[in-house]
Image (cartoon, helix red, strand yellow):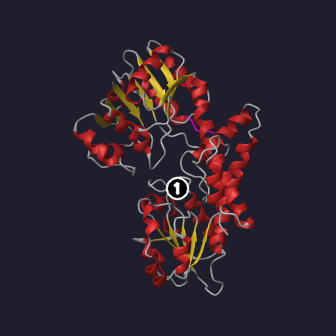
Amino acid sequence: MKIGIIGTGYVGLPTGVGLAELGNEVVCIDREISKIEALRNGKLTIYEDGLEELFRKNVANGRIKFTTSMQEGVAGADLVIIAVGTPPHPVTKEADMKYIHAAATELAEYLTGYTVIANKSTVPVGTGDDVESLIRKKNPNAEFDVVSLPEFLREGFAIHDFFNPDRIVIGANSERACKLLRELYKPFEHKAKILCVGRRSSETIKYASNAFLAMKIHYINEMADFCEKAGADIYEVANGMGLDSRIGAKFLNPGPGYGGSCFPKDTNAMAYMGRQNGVNLSLIETAIKGNEMRQKQMAERILSKLPDDECLPKIAVLGLAFKGGTDDCRVSPAMAIVENLLNNREAQIVAFDPKAMNNAKKVLGDKITYAEDAYAAAKDADVLAILTEWEDFKHLNLKELKMLMRKPVIVDLRNLLNPQAVRAEGFDYSRIGQA
């Protein structure tokens, strides 16, 4: 198939590369000239584990191309995927649909022959109707169907998830559109359930799924707090819970709260839609408030370990991305914790992240100092705080750290290190969910 993808971010680019790898002819469209020029020159604009090899392979064989021209990407396409941002409104937190609407209006005039338009961006329920109306208004003679095609790719694991999906959900109000997408995903029909549902149901599935996972994360974090006070071990508790098939083991890892481009945005949007429809989504509302408080509490844990005798104590921060495997700092718990540290005590903060330094600098600027590696960050530190679960941080040289730090104190908010090994080296070591 010929496929046009509008948007080259954390959804559009991995999806485009994956579809090209399946043998499709893919054209990725983006208005940002610098992005397209970089991609044309073989330079990735995001970090995603496993993406670079497939990207280079499919650029070389000509199965994926990049353009700023909507006409080039849309004309003659069997499928056009909209994968642009839907950022939260600064006040209401509802999804901002201006990029979706702009894309739909612009692509309409270039449709030739029957085309399926797929919303892969996470969009409010009813967006498919709006997109259909906008296209029909701009091009009354166009032959098309609008479908919902929610993405379930985890950042950091997007390539793995693309080729190993749990399920593929197609929200289509026409059998013709559903048939085309079933054909597209035929390579996965023996490894994943392909579910064709109504368009509004599909739009709801995405929000309902992310909100449920966010609530699960918030719940296990509350249980971790309880375990610390009651003398239980959160990992033993989570293991016992996860063995129940009704609960499952995934998303039962305690930490500093959920973050990233999806969960915070989608829980807020779901809560907003609930209010708009007169439905009390109290569990989601509680998880949102609890998660915001979580990051303040995590900052307080770090601050409580600072010595009173230092007029300008130093905090070493390991990790700024919202999770390991990505350079994405959007709504990162690590970044929120750093901001809380800055707001609550005058301290020198030196940070290191293997992939997210440039993105972090765009947000934090010169409020903090940036180190070239974990050991440079730790030099003369009074506290070392682990905020992102990078694999590298599991294998820190504890002897070297102790020699470098002013005081041997580690606050591990990702529970990466072995408690016995760290304490055996003489560190004051604290983690989540264990006394």
Relative depth, front residue between 123 and 36:
123
- Can you say whether 190 is above or below 154 in the image? above
- SS category of the residue bearing label 1: loop
Q: Is residue 337 left or right of residue 405?
A: right
Q: Residue at x 35, y 48 (%)?
A: 50
Residue sitting at 44 percent across and 18 percent down?
Answer: 179
Q: Is residue 82 magenta?
A: no
Whether residue 344 sits left or right of residue 157 in the image: it is: right
Q: Position of residue 371 (x, y in %)?
A: 43, 72
At label 1, counting other C-alpha atoms closer than 10 Å, the crowd grade (few under 14, some 14-19, many 20 or more) is many
* Residue closest to the eye, 271 or 18: 18
The span picked out in magenta is 93-97
* Disc 1 target residue: 322
> Which of the pair 395/295 is nearer the observer?
395
Q: Quadrant of residue 33?
A: top left
Mark 1 belongs to which amino acid? Phe
Looking at this rendering, what residue extends furthest in the bottom direction?
309
In this rendering, does residue 135 appear at all?
yes
Tally of numbered tags: 1
Magenta-colored segment: predominant secondary structure: loop
Q: Magenta includes 94?
A: yes
For the C terminus, the image quarter is: bottom right
Image point 56% across, 43% down: which residue? 87
Q: Quadrant of the N terminus?
A: top left
**Residue 23 image position (x, y, % from top left):** 30, 30
Image position, residue 142 (x, y; %) = 43, 15
Quick one: which residue is furthest to the top in this view? 141
Q: Please tell me in which quadrant of the rendered image residue 95 appears.
A: top right
Vertical placement of 206 versus 415: above or below?
Answer: above
- Which quarter of the figure has residue 253? bottom right
- In the picture provided, is 9 more to the left or to the right than 333? left
The answer, for residue 109, to whether it is visible in the render is: no
